[in-house]
Amino acid sequence: MLCFGPTPVTSETLDKYPNLECIVGSSAGYNHFDLAECRRRGIRVTGAGDSFSEDAADFAVGLLIDVLRRVSVADRFVRAGSWPVKGNFPLGSKVGGKRVGIVGLGSIGSRIGKRLEVFGCSIAYTSKRMKPNVSFPFHSNIHDLAINSDVLILCCALTKETHHIVGKEVLTALGKEGIVINVGRGALIDEEELVQFLKRGEIGGAGLDVYENEPHVPKELFGLDNVVLSPHAAVITPESFKALEELFTYNLEAFFSNKPLRAQIECE
Amino acid sequence: MLCFGPTPVTSETLDKYPNLECIVGSSAGYNHFDLAECRRRGIRVTGAGDSFSEDAADFAVGLLIDVLRRVSVADRFVRAGSWPVKGNFPLGSKVGGKRVGIVGLGSIGSRIGKRLEVFGCSIAYTSKRMKPNVSFPFHSNIHDLAINSDVLILCCALTKETHHIVGKEVLTALGKEGIVINVGRGALIDEEELVQFLKRGEIGGAGLDVYENEPHVPKELFGLDNVVLSPHAAVITPESFKALEELFTYNLEAFFSNKPLRAQIECE
């Protein structure tokens, strides 16, 4: 079965294809697959692997610089003809020196860490388990990570365990100056709670590429200058599509010639 | 003399202070000082030194990611409620793999190079002279650099030699997909020419923090989605102001106690 984008593959879908052996997917996330059911039926599943990792990491860093240094709001300010009519443009905040907590140190998260280190940020992370050969400090849970971070960057998979992993408690732990960047999946965050925290100024800002009920974006965010919004575009460039196309073709050929698949998803 | 920001210090200004020995300045650029006249009179001049370099480099990278990955335009798209009403958001372009030409490899330019290397860009530069101990390829003039670059980042000082260093020829050499980022001074670019190139689609995009006649920004740019505009804000964060304050105070004390000055400007 070829599966483009986040098309849901449920137990009912699988019932229709009793001889199915392999799903060749094209997505970085895999919450749209019923992986337990795939495992039970012995179906192998592949995803986008690393094809989108560079792009997603670049975009996460772009969102963070944008929120901290107020790039999009500066652009709005100039285009509205507010310079210098409305006085000086309010200061942003320096990227270097920020304590950045990465939630999910996989192929995207580790690339984000590598990039932000060079800007002078100090990096820590939480992940399902501590990674070997990684020098960044590990926190066993997101709450501890949030207490010790100025910025949280979400780039983990959406699973039952990570659903609403950022809610009232984590946002409170992150604090008034804290910033949340989400290039993972919308439902990693309790969106309603985040909107309230932002509106009440109980958190510093947010850069969001994903939302809980896409393409719905909470309208309350549209009037806020401390958020940067993008339409689930972090992983999409022509260059990464090309890499994905190659992976897709490779996996099709590999399946029919009994070679090992690439970017196979662990069906836990 | 204490000199805040880009206050002009001309030969006439200096005539009023015949016993002046030192100007303690606060600016990264120094085109507002008549340096030849200062040298003739034996007046030492200091600037902001490295205080703003990290911020300016961060902002230049932020502008580049923004132009390539269309962050500000994505934000406008979402806020306008265009997602998904107006269909899919058009693709951006990958940061990695871009050939970035840095114009002026001083304290800002070298930091930009260091950052963009980690994103997988290949870096080259032009500068008054080839830098020792720098592995990036050197081009002796900006035209050669432009021919071999996808992106030009301007972060050199504005002098008689660099005035309008980017004009019709360099923009043509950079080509239709080329991108110009300017965090130096507005008059490094022939702005009228740049606007025409952008309007005619003869260049790919631009990220501009500085303009030829600030705070005037050409209105033709306001309607373009391939430009990101900011109001001369690249070097300004509270953190860098604090560093500058310390440098400023240090230089005042150093002058009166006959100690060597820091961040002294070469009066060529």
Image: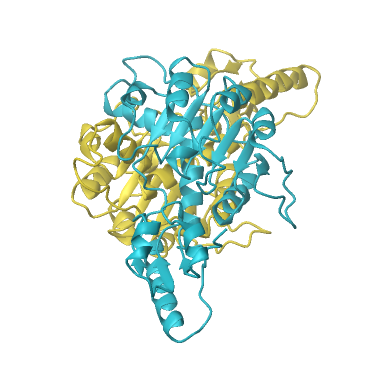
Chain colours: A yellow, B cyan
Q: Look at the picture and state if B202 lies above or below B170.
A: above
Q: Look at the picture and state if B258 lies above or below A100.
A: below
Q: How many numbered marks appear?
A: 0
Q: Look at the picture and state if B76 lies above or below B116.
A: above
Tell me: B177 left or right of B182: right
Nearest the eye: B157 or A146: B157
Residue A188's spot in the image, x, y percent? 39, 42
Residue B190's spot in the image, x, y percent? 47, 30
- Residue located at (27% from left, 50% from top): A90
Tell me: A125 left or right of A150: right
Q: Residue furthest bottom?
A: B257
Q: Examine the rendering and report whether any part of residue A262 can be seen.
A: yes
- Residue located at (45% from left, 44% from top): B185
Nearest the eye: A61 or B195: B195
Nearest the eye: B120 or B268: B268
Asked which quadrant contains residue B174, the reply is: top right
The quadrant in which the C terminus of chain B is found is: bottom right
Residue A53's spot in the image, x, y percent? 59, 37
- Residue located at (50% from left, 70% from top): B42
The quadrant in which the N terminus of chain B is found is: bottom left
Nearest the eye: B133 or B257: B257
Residue A8's spot in the image, x, y percent? 47, 22
Q: Examine the rendering and report whether any part of residue A183 can be seen.
A: no
